[in-house]
């Protein structure tokens, strides 16, 4: 039976024990529990959205697992916001800041409760990275349980398709009845929206990082398999405690690189390039956009899931989930990286192979007349030859910018467009609706970075461009804000330094010429007043304009947004709070 760590039985602890123990016994613990490893179960369960609505049930099963393995569990809650509900409104400015709040709430619960180890349970965009950040920060034995995925709706409808259906309905290309039907059933179960947005990307990466049990990411929410994983997660945290296998021994440089390889191969959300550096920062690990670029230039996309591919994300687990993806990627991975099983990535894969996992799991796909190869392709016959993401640098983005290369039409991979500049997304959206944005325009939306207004996603602008057959092939979006994982089209985000920090994006004017060259990783101002200029002249123009920038006054902030915008790191470092 595992016991609490000796150094926790310190003079301090003995002094506070009479009152503190009485309080713990008041939560239902027994006297024997006081001598067992104190295990925090941090859960983002709540009625906030489908990603979190079922998680308290899983937390209770994980608690059974902790008790079974000889620990003393204590469930603490802090639910997360829904980006989908906040999208397109001022509320979206809270999204990235909410990651910090959730990480701090976890830190608070773990430290204030003197816990020896922790289980984290969450499923959505910000809660998953927040819990991984907290695990890294706390440096205690910790394990993550991904919240699982939603089933697709009728005709494989996923949430990211509802906006397109709405546009069709407005164009009278879909009946009101049909539109209403799909909207009503787009989110038919609990779990993460069934396309490869940020939430599913981060669930997959939690497993790729070694922090979640093999095969646990993207299980269908509500399947009994999830309850089994929750119970095993409860058992496993006690084993971590026994081995003193703390989060920093798992979240290593190799683990971050493994996550980047998987991110490239699944064509995951660009938001992961905010979350992985924030996790790396907690452990003083290196993270550079140069490494991201190199990995994406050599790792192919092998996951055939929406929005890059064709199938809903609810098919991934049936194809063998993250183990099937990592098995295909073996040659690119650090197979000796340690995981929460106490074994390495390579040993976990070998174990699953021995158990027949890779043969058996895809049998679920037979229900849909699909095979594993339809969802997870071999690296020798990939969906795309290079990784899903690209990093661009240039005189507009000296510290880098990112884009989802796999979601860009061929003709937009090399593009020179005329700048149309907006300082907020609502004006840009109106301009698109009023047909002021024309083929060949480069739409610039700035003052959207973390230090200006929390870095909201520009989903509705990207959706308005992507759902227009002509604009999606002829207009690019450039912003110091970010994008939803479901965004499609030629969108360059995270432009750094951001406008509010005096970055060159603040100096762009209408009719400037902007070059996007994805293959060569360039984002440059190449002309002014509609005319190309020499490099020396562009340097002079930028210098001059930056010296004479008109003052930009961000809206007055109070509370959380004031705290976040005043204290966050730039986007290329992860936007964490310093
Ligand atoms: Fe979390 Fe849709 S509610 S991804």
Image (tube, rainbow, N blue to C red):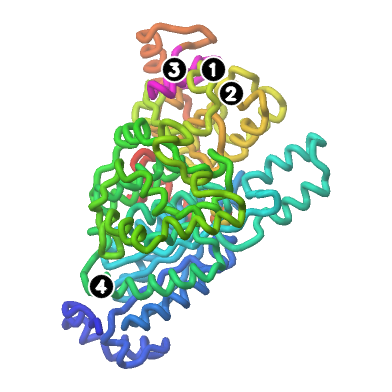
Image: magenta residue range: 508-526
What is the CA distance from the residue labelled 3 to the residue labelled 2? Answer: 16 Å
Q: Residue at x 29, y 45 (%)?
A: 333
**Is residue 567 in sight in this rendering?**
no
Q: CA distance from mark 4 to mark 2?
A: 53 Å
Q: Few, some or many C-alpha atoms within 10 Å of disc 3 (few <14, some 14-19, many ≥20)?
A: many
| Image quadrant assignment for residue 108 | bottom left
Q: Nearer the viewer, residue 394 or 165?
A: 165
Residue 247: percent from left, percent from top: 27, 61
Mark number displayed over residue 525: 3
142 shown above or below 13: above
Say which residue label 2 marks. Answer: 475
Tell which circle, 4 or 1, labels the residue nearer the N-terminal end: 4
Q: Separation of disc 1 and disc 2 at Cα?
A: 7 Å
Q: Residue at x 46, y 21 (%)?
A: 516
Q: Secondary structure at mark 1?
A: strand
- Labels 1 and 2: the sequence-earlier one: 1
The mark lying in front, picked from 4 and 2, is 4
SS category of the residue bearing label 3? strand
- Per the model, the C-alpha gap separating discs 1 and 3 is 10 Å
- Residue identifier under label 4: 241
Q: Earlier in the sequence, mark 4 or mark 2?
A: 4
Disc number placed over residue 417 in the picture, else none: 1
Task: Choose between 507 and 241: the one closer to the eye.
Answer: 241
In magenta segment, residue 525? yes
Q: Residue at x 48, y 43 (%)?
A: 303
Seen in the picture, residue 328 relative to 436 is either above or below; the reply is below
Q: Nearer the viewer, mark 3 or mark 2?
A: 2
Between discs 3 and 2, the one toward the N terminus? 2
């Amino acid at each position: 039976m595992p016991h609490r760590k000796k150094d926790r039985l310190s003079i301090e602890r003995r002094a506070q024990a009479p009152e503190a123990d009485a309080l713990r016994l008041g939560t239902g613990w027994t006297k024997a529990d006081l001598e067992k490893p104190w295990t925090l179960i941090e859960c983002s369960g709540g009625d906030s959205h489908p990603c979190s609505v079922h998680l308290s049930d899983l937390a209770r099963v994980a608690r059974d697992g902790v008790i079974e393995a000889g620990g003393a569990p204590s469930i603490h809650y802090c639910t997360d916001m829904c980006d989908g509900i906040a999208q397109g409104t001022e509320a979206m400015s809270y999204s990235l800041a909410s990651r910090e709040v959730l990480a701090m709430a976890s830190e608070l619960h773990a430290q204030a409760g003197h816990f020896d180890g922790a289980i984290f349970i969450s499923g959505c965009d910000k809660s998953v990275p927040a819990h991984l950040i907290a695990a890294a920060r706390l440096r205690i034995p910790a394990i993550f349980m991904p919240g699982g995925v939603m089933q697709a709706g009728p005709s494989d409808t996923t949430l990211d398709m509802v906006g397109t259906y709405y546009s069709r309905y407005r164009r009278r290309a879909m009946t009101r009845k049909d539109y209403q039907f799909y909207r009503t059933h787009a989110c038919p179960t609990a779990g993460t929206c069934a396309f490869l947005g940020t939430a599913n990307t981060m669930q997959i990466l939690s497993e790729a990082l070694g922090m979640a049990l093999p095969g646990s990411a993207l299980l269908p929410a509500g399947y009994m398999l999830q309850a089994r994983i929750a119970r095993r997660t409860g058992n496993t945290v006690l084993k971590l405690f026994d081995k003193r296998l703390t989060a920093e021994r798992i979240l290593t440089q190799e683990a971050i690189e493994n996550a980047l390889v998987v991110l490239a191969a699944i064509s995951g959300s660009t938001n992961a390039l905010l979350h992985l550096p924030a996790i790396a920062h907690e452990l003083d690990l290196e993270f550079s956009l140069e490494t991201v670029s190199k990995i994406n230039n050599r790792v192919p996309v092998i996951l055939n899931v929406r929005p890059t591919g064709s199938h809903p994300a609810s098919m991934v687990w049936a194809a063998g989930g993250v183990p099937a993806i990592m098995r295909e990627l073996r040659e690119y991975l650090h197979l000796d990286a340690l995981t929460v099983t106490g074994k390495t990535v390579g040993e976990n894969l070998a174990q699953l192979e021995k158990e027949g996992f890779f043969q058996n799991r895809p049998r679920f796909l037979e229900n849909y007349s699909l095979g594993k190869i339809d969802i997870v392709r071999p690296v020798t016959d990939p969906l795309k030859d290079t990784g899903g993401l690209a990093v661009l640098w240039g005189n507009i983005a000296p510290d880098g910018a990112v884009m989802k290369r796999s979601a860009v039409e061929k003709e937009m991979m090399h593009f020179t467009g005329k700048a149309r500049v907006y300082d907020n997304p609502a004006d840009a959206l109106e301009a698109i609706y009023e047909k002021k944005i024309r083929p060949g325009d480069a739409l610039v939306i700035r003052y959207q970075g973390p230090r200006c207004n929390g870095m909201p996603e520009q989903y509705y602008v990207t959706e308005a461009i992507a759902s227009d057959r002509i604009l999606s092939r002829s207009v690019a979006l450039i912003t110091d804000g970010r994008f939803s994982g479901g965004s499609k089209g030629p969108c360059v985000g995270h432009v750094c330094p951001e406008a509010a920090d005096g970055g060159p994006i603040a100096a762009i004017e209408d009719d400037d010429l902007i070059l996007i060259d994805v293959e060569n990783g360039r984002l440059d101002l190449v002309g002014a007043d509609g005319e190309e200029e020499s490099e020396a002249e562009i340097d002079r123009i930028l210098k001059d304009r930056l010296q004479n920038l008109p003052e930009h006054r961000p809206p007055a902030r109070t509370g959380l947004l004031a705290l976040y915008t005043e204290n966050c790191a730039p986007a290329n470092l992860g936007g964490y709070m310093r």
